[in-house]
Image (cartoon, rainbow, N blue to C red):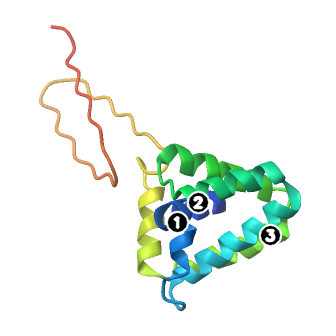
Amino acid sequence: MDPLSVGAAVAVLAGTKGVEKLGGLVAESGWRAVGQALGRLRQFFADTDEDASARLEKFVSAGDASEDSVVAVGELIDDKLRSAPKVRTEVELLIAEARADDEIAGLLAAAAVPGGLGQRITQIAIGNDNIQVGQVGGDVTIDVQRPPR
């Protein structure tokens, strides 16, 4: 299993497609399991925490896949599931089922790589003629600063 928490995985997938689009997707695809996981979370939040329920609904209806929103909702889900191991297990099983879908597996893998969801890589090189090779998924910003001579 990749290093994404269950909350982060649900937030990444819900933010990517938006739950309103899930109903139109093929029933046997992994998106069905994503929709079920989101439905279970909606039910749990509605039964236990009105504020958390409102935040989840706002995120899902907005279809906001920005990193800040995804990280915040993922943390909210993880926080609430700490006190509900049975619900957490149900959602984990549904996300595991969804990972069988290649598209979903790719989205979660991209979010889990360094530089993906809420992560930052800092690399410092000192000296002349340094050659550095690396691979990063997602958006990359490179800031090159030369030391004073």
Residue 49 sits in quarter? bottom right
Among numbered discs 2 and 3, the one appearing first in the sequence: 2
Q: Give how far across and how far down residue 56 sits, in percent.
A: 68, 56
Whether label 1 touches label 2, CB < 8 Å: yes
- How crowded pointer 1 is (Cα within 10 Å; few <14, some 14-19, many 20+) is rated as some
**82 on left or right of 2:** right
Q: Note whether 73 is above or below 124 in the view shown.
A: below
Question: Can I make out residue 22 in this image?
Answer: yes
Residue 148 sits in quarter? top left
Q: Determine whether the residue tagged by mark 2 lies in a helix, strand or loop.
A: helix
Question: Can I make out residue 78 in this image?
Answer: no
- Label 1 or label 2, whichever lies nearer to me, is 2
Seen at 41% across and 76% down, the residue is 103
Amino acid type of the residue tagged 2 in the rendering: Ser
Label 1, label 2: how many angstroms apart (C-alpha)? 7 Å
Amino acid type of the residue tagged 1 in the rendering: Gly
Q: Note whether 133 is above or below 53 in the view shown.
A: above
- How crowded pointer 3 is (Cα within 10 Å; few <14, some 14-19, many 20+) is rated as some
Q: Write down the residue under mark 2.
A: 61
Residue 141 sits in quarter? top left
- How crowded pointer 2 is (Cα within 10 Å; few <14, some 14-19, many 20+) is rated as few
Q: Write down the residue under mark 1.
A: 18
Label 2, label 3: how many angstroms apart (C-alpha)? 22 Å
Q: Determine whether the residue tagged by mark 3 lies in a helix, strand or loop.
A: helix
Amino acid type of the residue tagged 3 in the rendering: Val
- Label 2 or label 3, whichever lies nearer to me, is 2
Among numbered discs 1 and 3, the one appearing first in the sequence: 1
Label of residue 4 in the image? none
Q: Give how far across and how far down residue 145 sits, in percent.
A: 23, 21
Q: Write down the residue under mark 3.
A: 87
